[in-house]
Amino acid sequence: MIYSINKPIGWTSFDVVKKIRGITREKKVGHAGTLDPFAEGVLIIGTGPGVAKHRMAIESYIKTHQPFVLALNTQKNIAEALIDVRAACHPVRLLADCNEHLTLPQPLITPVSMLPVDVRQALSGKVLYDFGIEIIQDTFGFHPTHCILPSSLVMAYALAIATSAKASRVLLAGFDGYADGDPRNKQSEDIIEAYQKADDRLEIISITPTRYPISKTSIYGEL
């Protein structure tokens, strides 16, 4: 189960873990990063070239506004210390990336219980947070321990993680889009359309240039 916690001023992450243990009676409780009391929602770092192009501005934004930072797969175009957690969900991609995931310091949110045995074994020793997936066409659903997605693309998974954790809003960086005629544009647009129809959807704002039909702002105007 994943919780988004508004940590009171003066509390340490250990204080939060101790409190959650007391409330839930769960022995195994960890944290994936720290949200400042005035945090700016969840910032999802995609794999588009916009991340590298605007790296200094993105890093400055994170340091100033302290959003919770979720990176897709093995994205490494910003400083590792600024990434709170990673998300990956496609079994084939996970198996291909498992050695790299083992070298990355962040916990990994993934549908652990649904992964093939060989993928789970390959990720042995990695801190994993189990967040399940059910695939239903054109549908998003947000629950404490799992989500319903229109596809298994990690973009959809990341949106569902942020929404299930009840973030205040979702910021995107590095979701540039692809060249004209690339079928991946349609896949991403379909995900966005399905998400924007969901009852519990959050506001989505791209802080780097994107071709997708979502709200946009210049990251330089936020510094």
Image (tube, grey):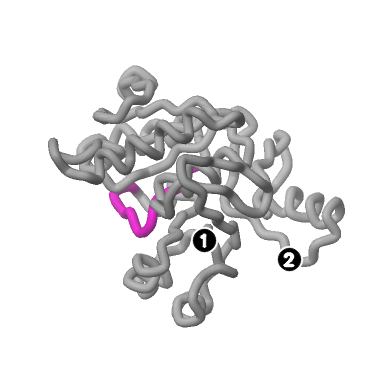
Q: Label 1 to label 2, Cα distance in Å?
A: 17 Å
Which SS class for mark 1? strand
Say if the magenta span includes residue 156: no
Dividing the picture into quarters, in which one does residue 194 lie?
A: top left
Q: How busy is the neighbourhood of tag 1: few (under 14 within 10 Å), some, or many (20 plus)?
A: many
Look at the numbered discs 1 and 2 and tell me whether their residues touch, using CB distance below 8 Å: no
In the image, 162: left or right of 7? left
Identify residue for label 2: 28
In terms of depth relative to the viewer, which is nearer, 210 or 220?
210
Mark 1 = which residue? Answer: 110
- The answer to whether residue 189 shows anywhere in this view is yes
Q: Is residue 83 left or right of residue 21?
A: left
The kind of secondary structure the magenta stretch mainly shows is: loop
Measured as percent of width and height from the top left, residue 147 is found at 58, 49
Give the residue type that dot 2 points to: Lys
Q: Position of residue 20 (x, y in %)?
A: 79, 51
Q: Callout 2: helix, strand or loop? A: loop
Q: In the image, what residue occupies the spot 55% across and 30% down? A: 201
Name the N-terminal-most of marks 1 and 2. Answer: 2
Asked if residue 40 shows in the view, the reply is no
Identify the residue at horizontal 57%, vertical 38% (top origin): 163
Q: Nearer the viewer, residue 54 or 161?
A: 161
The magenta segment: 69-78
Q: In screen coordinates, is 107 left or right of 181? A: right
Q: Nearer the viewer, mark 1 or mark 2?
A: 1
Image position, residue 166 (x, y; %): 63, 36
Q: Which mark is residue 205?
A: none
**Residue visible at 13% across and 36% down?**
180
The quadrant of the image that shows the C terminus is top left
Q: Amino acid at mark 1?
A: Thr
